Image (cartoon, helix red, strand yellow):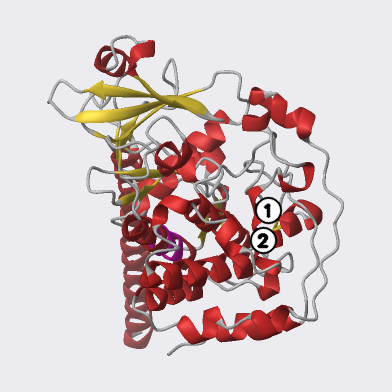
């Protein structure tokens, strides 16, 4: 009898303990669910902009439609300005405030109510890719900082009446302005200043490439100068992220005629070497003070790259150089210009594999400036003795170039096809070797 009572007691006690365990587990599970819900609500609220954010505070809008490459839902901490504030800052976008007019928008000089001078880019309404270009600028300039990249102060909300980007104001115009524009003066852009422009531009591009970004629109109108003639590279509307585990990005060629890599134009394969080609054109502009495209030149020399390659192949660099730079009278200037011309020549190789990287180009420029590249770069006559250049067919885009709007918005290049000699591989190896 006692055994039966004891057994019943043990059974009842076991059931009570099991019941208590179930209750405890249920309460614990409910607590975990509640905590997860509270965390989700906190996280969602944290990402949502405050009601009064449009003028001074920080925007963290997800822009999920344009963040596919980032995994979606990325929060960009960018100051967001109201349209009204920027309209006031630019005197209602007064034409007298215009700083420049490019392929994607007009830039205006403005002054904020806190006294800061700014450059406000107003993206064209008819540009169907304006939101993508807007987001490109925000993504890149909000994440990366370099002394030779223009700084982004903020932008309007994506839901604003217009898409506006606000940059630091760079007061001294563009390199193009000083080379062959309204501010052109041989006394201002001396050779040492031009050499420094080349080095600082290369430094900015090296930084971008190290950050897996291809600029895709390197040109002298996108290289700004401050009052000390220091470089600020601008305009990232066409830029692309370039993962370091891929050889190229397949995309339709875009850029400005005269600067677009011909291999990219032909194969639709974008690489960092596409920026190298464009940089080669910039180097020739710095040497010659000529524009990248000029339809008044001979049909085979409309593109400055073609003209330069032909002159260099014929060892007629003196005919390419701006006579105001002291090429004939200053031996040190002559040495550096010869070195930069040969570096540009290698950057302009049609085969991208024969071009240096931007890092190699930067190192070479520094060695040229320090007088360490004279032997490698100046004694190239033997390489060209057996080379007999023949005229190459050109893309006929004269009609395109006559139409200014088409020229600015065209994704095509007017680059010429020219043949690369195998001997240039030796020159490329020599020029990019590290001392």
- Report x, y in % for residue 284: 55, 56
The dominant secondary structure in magenta is helix
Q: Is residue 261 visible?
A: no
In the displayed orientation, state which residue is furthest to the front. 329
The residue to which callout 2 is attached is 311
**Residue 66 in magenta?**
no
Element at label 1: helix
**Res. 243 image quadrant:** bottom right
Location of residue 195 in the rendering, given as x and y in whole percent from the top left corner: 38, 61
Q: Nearer the viewer, residue 333 or 293?
A: 333
Magenta-tinted stretch = 201-206
Counting labels gives 2
Return the residue found at the far bottom.
Answer: 435
204 magenta-colored: yes
Gap in angstroms between the C-alphas marked 2 and 1: 6 Å
Q: Residue at x 29, y 16 (%)?
A: 90
Where residue 260 sits: x, y (%)? 66, 50
Tag 2 near tag 1, CB within 8 Å: yes
Within 10 Å of disc 2 (Cα), the crowding (few <14, some 14-19, many 20+) is some
Relative placement, left or right, of 8 versus 91 is: right
Up-down relation of residue 395 to residue 385 (above or below):
above
Asked whether 162 or 271 is in front, the reply is: 271
Say if 333 sits above or below 261 in the image.
below
Quarter of the image for the N terminus: give it.
bottom left
Disc 1 residue crowd, few under 14, some 14–19, many 20+, Cα 10 Å: some
């Amino acid at each position: 009898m006692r055994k039966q009572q004891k057994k019943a007691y043990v059974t009842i006690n076991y059931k009570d303990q099991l019941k208590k365990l179930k209750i405890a587990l249920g309460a614990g599970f409910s607590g975990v669910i509640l905590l997860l819900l509270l965390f989700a609500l906190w996280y969602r609220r944290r990402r949502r902009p405050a009601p009064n954010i449009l003028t001074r505070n920080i925007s963290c809008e997800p822009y999920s439609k344009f963040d596919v490459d980032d995994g979606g839902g990325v929060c960009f901490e960018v100051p967001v300005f109201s349209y009204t504030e920027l309209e006031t800052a630019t005197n209602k976008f007064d034409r007298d405030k215009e700083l420049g007019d490019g392929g994607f928008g007009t830039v205006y000089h403005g002054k904020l109510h806190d006294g800061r001078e700014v450059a406000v880019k107003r993206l064209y309404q008819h540009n169907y890719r304006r939101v993508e270009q807007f987001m490109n600028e925000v993504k890149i300039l909000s994440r990366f900082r370099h002394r030779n990249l223009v700084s982004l102060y903020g932008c309007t909300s994506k839901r604003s009446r217009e898409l506006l980007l606000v940059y630091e104001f760079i007061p001294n115009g563009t390199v193009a302005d000083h080379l062959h524009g309204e501010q052109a003066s041989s006394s201002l852009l001396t050779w040492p200043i031009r050499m420094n422009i080349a080095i600082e531009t290369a430094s900015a591009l090296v930084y971008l490439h190290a950050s897996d970004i291809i600029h895709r629109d390197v040109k002298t109108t996108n290289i700004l100068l401050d009052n000390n003639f220091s470089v600020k590279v601008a305009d990232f509307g066409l830029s692309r992220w370039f993962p370091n585990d891929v050889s190229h990005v397949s995309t339709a060629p875009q850029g400005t005629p005269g600067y677009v890599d011909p291999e990219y134009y032909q194969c639709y394969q974008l690489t960092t070497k596409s920026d190298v080609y464009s940089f080669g054109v910039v180097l020739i502009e710095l040497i010659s003070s000529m524009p990248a495209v000029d339809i008044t030149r001979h049909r085979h020399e409309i593109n400055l790259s073609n003209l330069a390659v032909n002159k260099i192949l014929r060892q007629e660099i003196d005919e390419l150089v701006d006579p105001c730079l002291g090429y004939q009278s200053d031996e040190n200037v002559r040495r550096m210009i010869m070195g930069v011309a040969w570096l540009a020549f290698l950057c302009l190789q049609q085969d991208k594999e024969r071009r240096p990287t931007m890092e190699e180009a930067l190192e070479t420029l520094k060695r040229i400036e320090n007088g360490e590249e004279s032997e490698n770069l100046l004694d190239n006559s033997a390489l060209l003795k057996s080379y007999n250049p023949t005229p190459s067919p050109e893309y006929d885009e004269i009609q395109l170039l006559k139409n200014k709007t088409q020229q600015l918005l065209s994704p095509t290049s007017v680059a010429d096809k020219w043949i690369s000699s195998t001997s240039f591989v030796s020159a490329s190896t020599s020029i990019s070797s590290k001392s």
